[in-house]
Amino acid sequence: MWMTELPAFLPFFIGAFLVLMLKGVARAAVMLAIPVLGGIHLMLIPEGLHWQTELMGMALTPYRVDSLSLVFGLIFHIAAFINIVYSLHVKDTLQQFSAMIYAGSAIGAVFSGDLLSLFLFWEILAISSVFLIWARRTQRAYNAGMRYLIIQVLSGVLLLVGSVFYWRTHGNLDFNGIGLEGTYGWLIFIAFGIKCAFPMLHNWLTDAYPEATPTGTVFLSAFTTKVAVYALARGYPGTELLIYIGVTMACFPIFFAVIENDLRRVLAYSMINQIGFMVVGIGIGTALALNGAVSHAFNDILFKGLLFMSMGAVLHMTGEINGSKLGGLYKSMPKTTILCIIGAASISAFPLFSGFVSKSMVMTAALEEGYPVIWLLLLFSAAGVFHHAGIKIPYFAFFAHDSGIRTTEPPNNMLIAMGIAASLCVFIGSYPWLLYSILPYDTGYNPYDATHVLAQTQLLFFSALAFVWLNLKGMYPPELPSVNLDVEWFYRRLIPDALKVTFARIWRIDAIIRASFMRLLQSLLNFISRHEPDGVLSRAHLSSSMVIWSTLILAAFLLLSFI
């Protein structure tokens, strides 16, 4: 009984420290075994509250198992296994240790039954993940990692303060429905929103993820934002504000993604777009909508991970990731090309691919609950994601102008990991009821009705036609070697420039004051030096005055030296 109730995060934490002690095949074997055995163990855990304890009068539940946490726990184990396979060629202890802690903290967060336990894993998630960015060991990665860490820690601080207010109001820290009543509700909401990449709070994702290592970005794509999606589904289901936040998230990244040159940054914007669908589903709050949000999070981890893996393979083999410098790689990387296309078809919601069986649940729920404008905007964003992720990613990486780059396929472990993810994308798209059977609610939803299949096929066909037409007319935004800034312009350009101007003025005023004081002091010294030896300062009754003046002058110089 004790073994079946073992916290799901613990094997990952133990494995992380085994990574420090083992090398070579033994280390790889341990890393691969942990998510496999952990996933099997997850199937044996009885639902309910486990490991309940009390701390300073507060009841804590660090391990709660129910239908919602089990779905996320399962996909996190699958993602951890795939990502470990993908990174087996990496011989970097820092990355491997950080990745195990990172995956374990994500699993710990989704099984947390109280806000204090959630906060602890929330912060471990932030600290461990930043090392996957710094592991690239470039100045840009260091700077992006610092910005990332500051924002993630801010999220944790807001969560902690909100939890304190919640405890003062309710007398407990139970992590269930929170809502937006009271200060605590808004503080926790913003904390979740930062990690979920809400509009205006999203730039840590597009800034930091593309600067991580090829394998680190794949890990990052799987956990942080999905933990936030889980937290919103647990704490704020049916909050109407989320509908409008989510639809904004689904729409605005399209415009940045189509002009972005860095293909991993395109995928970062695409991630925000897909999270928008999940947030809309949580905001609608019906059984169908929540199932759609949860299932789309499940699928997004797979197909977005597959796309990040394919672009990571390109970066690993060519050293390039900008669309302007790539193209023609299908000749030397045909397997990677096919796997990337499967990921593109999945994110674009082609019938028989995983995105088709989850994205439609949210859109159907929007229509059923009387949100036709939201449905139209989601339809627009679905067409847009086909442009920037379904077409742009494989086209500019593998089929556009021939860059002249000739390489080979990535290491076999990378291909195997991409193959596993691609197989799951096709399998879930073909047999969706297996995914539906583990969702929190039983809705009897059928994605393969004639109307839905026909409508989605038409949408994809005309979207592809628009892409071809825009390309032929030279109207599609070209891949330019540039860096695009959106909201991050405020803290990467406006604020630093404003501070430079402000401090420049402060230093000028300081220099004027210093110069004026020095002129005054020099005048005083000149006045003293003009007196005769028998002058006023050398009279017998003032014989100690020179000592006093010397002390004052010395003090003035010392004061100036410390200003």
Image (cartoon, rainbow, N blue to C red):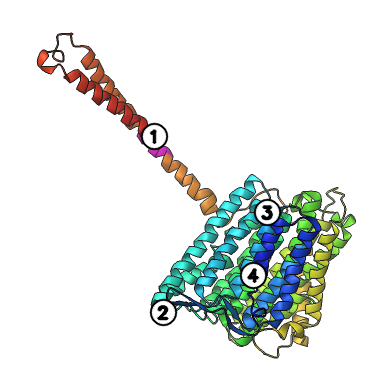
Give the image location of residue 172, x and y in percent: 44, 79
Per the rendering, the mark at residue 10 is: 4
The answer to whether 547 is drawn above or below residue 197 in the figure is: above
Residue at the image position 71 percent from the left and 88 percent from the top = 445
Q: Is residue 413 left or right of residue 43?
A: right
Is residue 167 shown in magenta? no
Q: Give the mark nearer the N terminus: 4 vs 3.
A: 4
Per the image, the residue denoted by label 1 is 508
Nearer the camera: disc 3 or disc 1: 3
Nearer the camera: disc 4 or disc 2: 4
Per the image, the residue denoted by label 3 is 94
Q: CA distance from mark 2 to mark 1?
A: 55 Å
Q: Give the mark nearer the N terminus: 1 vs 4.
A: 4
State the extent of the magenta-drawn residues as a range: 504-510
Give the image location of residue 483, x and y in percent: 64, 50
The answer to whether 10 is drawn above or below residue 46 in the figure is: above
Q: CA distance from mark 3 to mark 1?
A: 46 Å
Image quadrant where residue 557 sits: top left
Nearer the camera: disc 2 or disc 1: 2
